[in-house]
Image (spheres, rainbow, N blue to C red):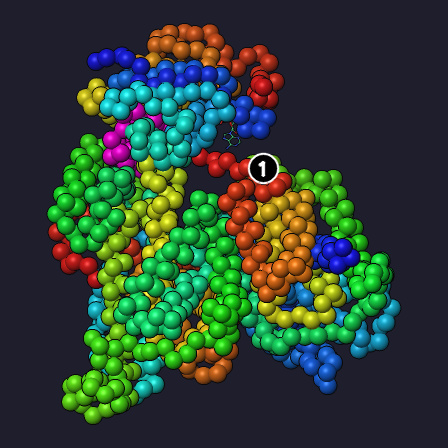
């Protein structure tokens, strides 16, 4: 397993009016490993994801991806859907975003839209169900079935996604992201709202995705039992700045991190205003 | 030159009216993030109330002009606000937190309902009222053209200015204004602070309706005729004004209204009166294409 | 105000009374200027007439209505609370299939049963035009979740394209049909492209404006459209070149002579009926198929969550544009048929009311539901036929119904959704309907 750099973020800054949500952040994400981003609420973690995945255009800075097949790409220049489609950097959302009225399987098939759409040749091959399209559809179904199975969703494949319990929806969202065939999977608080058993299962899943499929994972998480157990590398944000970086062991003992999480003596003033 | 000056005056008058209506769109958009399609029809309802009120006053032989106009304004504001309140309560409030599409459809349903309700209860024919305010000031006389400002135009502009000042004070200086702006920023947080968000939203609708009511009275005096269809076109124009000024921005709405009024007046005078609505519409599309945040609006970053 | 807030505990009669009184008060406020007073033209000047009786009735009805409504709702709620929730097997899909086939059977049989009744077949043809329009708009509103308030514009583009192609180049119905569809789709794309990148509400207002603009242009650009006078003597479609004329031109055949029938005006009426039935059914099959393709799923996904679509690498603008263009194209086809059936078109047929009617059909039918559109079109076309009163109150009721349905059942009345693909194939052996 190589630990070559997959993604390197340099001097990333994101401002909203007067608020600097991310401040001159530089991080690098190794290929085939799990990197965690942690930090208190409002630290800018989700904003960081939004900048990586084309939802926000960063004020300054660069995001370089070394795609295993396509070579180097600059993510900050790709807009909207391009990041997922061309660079295969796929994310999940902190507040789950499924297609609630569609079934679990349909959710996973929609994730393969670009592949299927191409095979349907502007829907003409699709309307007449030509063999080429049928083959592609079977293939997409196989991919979906594979991930359904891996995440233990096969039994509920034909149920509307919105009708399922929260923990299951989290898994569906991960399965859906995996159907896009990511080289980098960005998970925004995948353990939020999970019970201890579910979050232990999540640990196993993340580790196996990374070790067996070689998918690099970027993980935002507050649940330390997940973060400390699966991460190879942790980066700590506070007020949009990186305050520490290292292995779980190093982070656990870092005085800066402890201060950020537990607060300082002048806690009120620290949490009252956002550092400029 | 004289002709252009006259168009400038007409355009500003028209623009003031559009601006008043546009504020209703912009405020509602600011606070609940939706287009209140029924707003144009609220304006139309107020024009009908004005017609009824003027006719009643004439029947009672109340001839003092300031008295009559004040009375009509108060009546129109009162009843139109009630309509604004009721529309929100019935068609929008039950849909808060619903899908994106539901409130829009509900709004268009409400608009259709109001239009037909007025048509059925007040009649489909154009309602003319006798001139309320006649005469004006001759500004400039050239060989072949006389530039005139009518008293009505002066009144419209004055009333609009006074309202704008009062309104700015209300939004920036009072407790209500603070609550209203707080709800715009983050209604959940505002609710947590113990502010009644429902009531603030209701008040916003009533305020928007009240301004539309003033516009309705002014239009009735200015043109002397109303019909049940005026809300539709005025609605689209005022909405265009709101978008042009930057939806969500109050000064923007007024500015947008003035610009649309001027463009319409000049277009009708110099190019083609039949296509003046097409011109407004073209502006709407151009603004949306090249500057969707409008002149004074802030660019919208979709929160993910 | 607090009286209207839905209380969780059982309501006492006094509370219900207070609630109803509050509603009656609001009704009074709203009613005074609109119901209680009206202005009437008397010898050139307006005079105010009072209608206090009607106002009283309105307020009274509001009071009683609210009181009974609350009472029933409370009963329903307490009964629902008492009963344990039972997991129901959703039988709607099967039921819909059965009703769907029954309606199809009935519509095929209709001209046979009523072969001499021109009125019935004419009305049924009108229903089918609305069904087709409804199915077209359903792609945009029901599937893709985009609000198009100017759908009639595409209908007009289709109709005028045929009328103009005929009057300038002598094109026939069948030649003009595809061109008019393409024309409408092009208009859809030109209009949609700049707007579809933006928030959904903008699309609604822009399409609203567009519908009006097309009408203004048709009225004023007389060189093109002959203005308010419209375009007449548009030829009826032929059956593989066989016209439905009484006296075919020298050396040609008409439908009646070819089949050796006596000429009857009903032939053409029935032919037009079957023609729109076929067009509508083709539309249905086309849309049902699309729904099961990547584009169709993308439309629905878009309606559910646009941001998630982006995160899956979907080009949302293109997906929206495809829905908008296909909806426009279907509207264009319907327009060509309309022009051919009427033989005469003018801007008056393409007003906002028409857009609102089509939208009401889609909304009342349960957005996304094909059968729902048929039922809603039936109700909406037949209602005004019942009497003058109904036609006067038609739009009023549409408006009110749109609000009520959104408040009560935002998914629409018939909103059960059939998955487009299943893991367990055995379940769907029935095929598509
Ligand atoms: N679109 C936006 N407009 C304005 N401010 C924003 C926007 N998006 C994020 N912010 C601000 O940026 C800051 C960082 O937010 P972010 O959501 O990235 O925090 P986070 O680290 O993900 O927090 P949490 O752990 O609560 O999810 C916050 O102060 C937030 O209000
Ligand atoms: Mg976050």
Residue A18 or residue A210, whichever sits in front: A18
For residue C224, say whether it is visible.
yes
Q: Position of residue A190 (x, y in %)?
A: 34, 28
Q: Residue at x 49, y 16 (%)?
A: A24
For this view, does B299 lie left or right of residue B259? left
| Image quadrant containing the C terminus of chain B | top left
The residues colored magenta run: A169-190
Q: Residue at x 67, y 61 (%)?
A: B269
The image quarter in which residue A192 lies: top left
For this view, does B174 lie left or right of residue A49? right
| Image quadrant containing the N terminus of chain B | bottom right
Q: Residue at x 61, y 41 (%)?
A: B295
The stretch drawn in magenta includes residue A185: yes
- The answer to whether the beta carbon of the residue marked 1 is less than 8 Å from any atom of ligand 1 is no
The stretch drawn in magenta includes residue C67: no
Q: Residue at x 33, y 40 (%)?
A: C314
For this view, does A122 lie left or right of residue B200? left
Q: Residue furthest bottom?
A: C262
Q: How many marks?
A: 1
Q: Position of residue C202 (x, y in %)?
A: 50, 50
Write down the chain letter for disc 1.
Answer: B
Residue A172 or residue C319, whichever sits in front: C319
Q: Position of residue B20 (x, y in %)?
A: 68, 54
The image quarter in which residue C80 lies: bottom left
Residue A58 or residue C20, whichever sits in front: A58
For residue B85, say whether it is visible.
no
For this view, does B50 lie left or right of residue A219? right
Label 1 secondary element: loop
Give above or below for C108 relative to B30. below
Q: Which residue is mark 1?
A: B298
Residue neighbourhood size for the residue with mark 1, other residues' Cα within 10 Å, grouped as few (<14), some (14–19), many (≥20): some
Q: Position of residue B146 (x, y in %)?
A: 81, 62
């Amino acid at each position: 397993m190589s630990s070559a750099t997959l993604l390197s973020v340099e001097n990333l800054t994101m401002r909203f009016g007067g608020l600097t949500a991310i401040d001159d952040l530089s991080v690098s994400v190794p290929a085939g490993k799990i990197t965690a981003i942690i930090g208190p609420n409002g630290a800018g973690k989700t904003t960081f994801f939004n900048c990586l995945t084309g939802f926000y255009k960063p004020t300054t800075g660069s995001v370089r991806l070394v795609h295993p097949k396509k070579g180097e790409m600059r993510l900050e220049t790709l807009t909207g859907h391009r990041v997922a489609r061309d660079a295969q950097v796929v994310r999940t959302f902190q507040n789950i975003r499924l297609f609630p009225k569609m079934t679990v399987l349909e959710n996973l098939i929609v994730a393969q839209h670009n592949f299927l759409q191409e095979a349907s040749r502007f829907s003409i091959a699709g309307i007449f169900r030509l063999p080429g399209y049928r083959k592609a559809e079977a293939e997409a179904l196989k991919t979906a079935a594979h991930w359904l199975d891996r995440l233990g969703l096969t039994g509920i494949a034909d149920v509307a996604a919105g009708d399922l319990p929260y923990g299951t929806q989290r898994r569906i969202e991960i399965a859906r992201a995996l159907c896009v065939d990511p080289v980098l999977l960005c998970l925004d608080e995948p353990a939020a709202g999970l019970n201890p058993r579910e979050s232990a299962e999540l640990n196993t899943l993340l580790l196996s995705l990374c070790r067996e499929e070689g998918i690099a994972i970027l993980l935002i998480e507050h649940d330390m039992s997940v973060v400390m157990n699966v991460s190879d590398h942790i980066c700590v944000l506070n007020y949009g700045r990186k305050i520490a970086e290292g292995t779980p062991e190093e982070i656990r003992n870092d005085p800066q991190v402890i201060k950020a999480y537990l607060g300082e003596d002048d806690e009120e003033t620290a949490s009252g205003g956002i550092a400029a | 030159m004289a002709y252009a000056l006259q168009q400038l005056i007409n355009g500003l008058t028209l623009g003031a009216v559009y601006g008043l209506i546009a504020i209703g769109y912009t405020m509602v958009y600011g606070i609940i993030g939706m287009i209140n399609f029924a707003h144009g029809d609220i304006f139309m309802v107020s024009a009908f109330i004005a017609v009824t009120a003027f006719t009643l006053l004439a029947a009672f032989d109340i001839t003092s002009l300031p008295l009559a106009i004040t009375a009509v304004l108060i009546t129109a504001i009162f009843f139109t606000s009630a309509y604004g309140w009721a529309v929100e309560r019935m068609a929008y409030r039950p849909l808060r937190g619903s899908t994106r599409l539901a409130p829009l459809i509900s709004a268009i349903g409400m608009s259709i309902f109001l239009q037909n309700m007025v048509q059925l209860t007040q009649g489909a024919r154009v309602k003319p009222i006798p001139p309320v305010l006649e005469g004006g000031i001759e500004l400039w006389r050239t060989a072949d053209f006389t530039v005139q400002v009518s008293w009505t135009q002066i009144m419209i502009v004055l009333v609009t200015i006074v309202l704008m000042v009062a309104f700015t004070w209300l939004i920036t200086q009072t407790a209500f204004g603070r609550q209203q702006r707080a709800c715009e920023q983050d209604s959940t947080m505002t609710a947590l602070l113990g502010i009644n968000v429902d009531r603030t939203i209701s008040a916003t609708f009533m305020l928007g309706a009240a301004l539309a009511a003033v516009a309705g009275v002014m239009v009735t005096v200015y043109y002397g005729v109303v019909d049940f269809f005026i809300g539709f076109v005025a609605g689209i124009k005022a909405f265009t004004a709101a978008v042009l000024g930057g939806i969500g921005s109050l000064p923007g709405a007024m500015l947008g209204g003035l610009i649309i009024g001027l463009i319409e007046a000049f277009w009708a005078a110099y190019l083609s009166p039949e296509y003046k609505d097409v011109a407004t519409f073209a502006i709407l599309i151009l603004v949306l294409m090249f500057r969707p945040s409008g002149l004074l609006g802030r660019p919208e970053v979709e929160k993910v | 105000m607090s009286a209207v807030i839905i209380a969780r505990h059982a309501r006492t009669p006094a509370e219900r009374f207070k609630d109803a009184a509050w509603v009656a008060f609001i009704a009074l406020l709203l009613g005074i200027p609109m119901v209680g007073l009206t202005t009437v033209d008397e010898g050139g000047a307006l005079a105010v007439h009072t209608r206090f009786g009607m106002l009283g009735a309105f307020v009274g009805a509001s009071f009683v209505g609210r009181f009974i409504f609350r009472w029933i709702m409370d009963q329903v709620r307490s009964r629902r609370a008492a009963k344990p929730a039972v997991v129901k097997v959703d039988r709607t899909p099967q039921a819909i299939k059965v009703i769907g086939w029954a309606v199809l059977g009935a519509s095929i049989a209709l001209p046979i049963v009523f072969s001499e009744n021109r009125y019935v077949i004419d009305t049924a043809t009108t229903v089918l035009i609305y069904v087709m329009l409804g199915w077209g708009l359903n792609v945009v509103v029901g599937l893709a979740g985009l609000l198009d308030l100017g759908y009639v514009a595409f209908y007009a583009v289709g109709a005028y394209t045929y009328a103009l192609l005929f009057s300038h180049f002598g094109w026939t119905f069948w030649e003009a049909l595809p061109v008019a569809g393409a024309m409408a789709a092009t208009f859809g794309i030109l209009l949609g492209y700049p707007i579809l990148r933006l928030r959904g509400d903008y699309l609604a207002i822009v399409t609203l404006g567009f519908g009006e603009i097309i009408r203004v242009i048709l009225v004023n650009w007389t060189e093109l459209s002959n203005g308010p006078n419209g375009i007449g003597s548009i030829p009826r479609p032929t059956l593989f070149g066989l016209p439905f004329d009484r006296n075919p031109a020298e050396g040609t055949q008409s439908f009646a002579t070819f089949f050796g029938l006596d000429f009857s005006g009903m032939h053409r009426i029935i032919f037009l009926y079957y023609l729109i039935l076929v067009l509508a059914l083709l539309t249905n099959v086309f849309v049902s198929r699309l729904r099961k393709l990547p584009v169709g799923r993308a439309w629905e996904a878009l309606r559910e969550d646009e941001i998630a679509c982006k995160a899956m690498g979907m080009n949302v603008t293109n997906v929206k544009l495809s829905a908008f263009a296909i909806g426009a194209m279907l509207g264009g086809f319907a327009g060509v048929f309309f022009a051919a059936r009427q033989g005469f078109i003018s801007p008056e047929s393409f007003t906002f009311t028409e857009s609102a009617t089509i939208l009401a059909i889609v909304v009342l039918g349960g957005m996304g539901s094909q059968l729902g559109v048929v039922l809603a079109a039936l109700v909406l076309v037949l209602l005004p036929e019942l009497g003058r009163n109904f036609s006067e109150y038609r739009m009023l009721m549409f408006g009110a119904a749109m609000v009520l349905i959104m408040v009560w059942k935002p998914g629409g009345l018939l909103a059960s959704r059939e998955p487009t693909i299943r893991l367990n194939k055995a379940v769907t052996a029935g095929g598509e309907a």
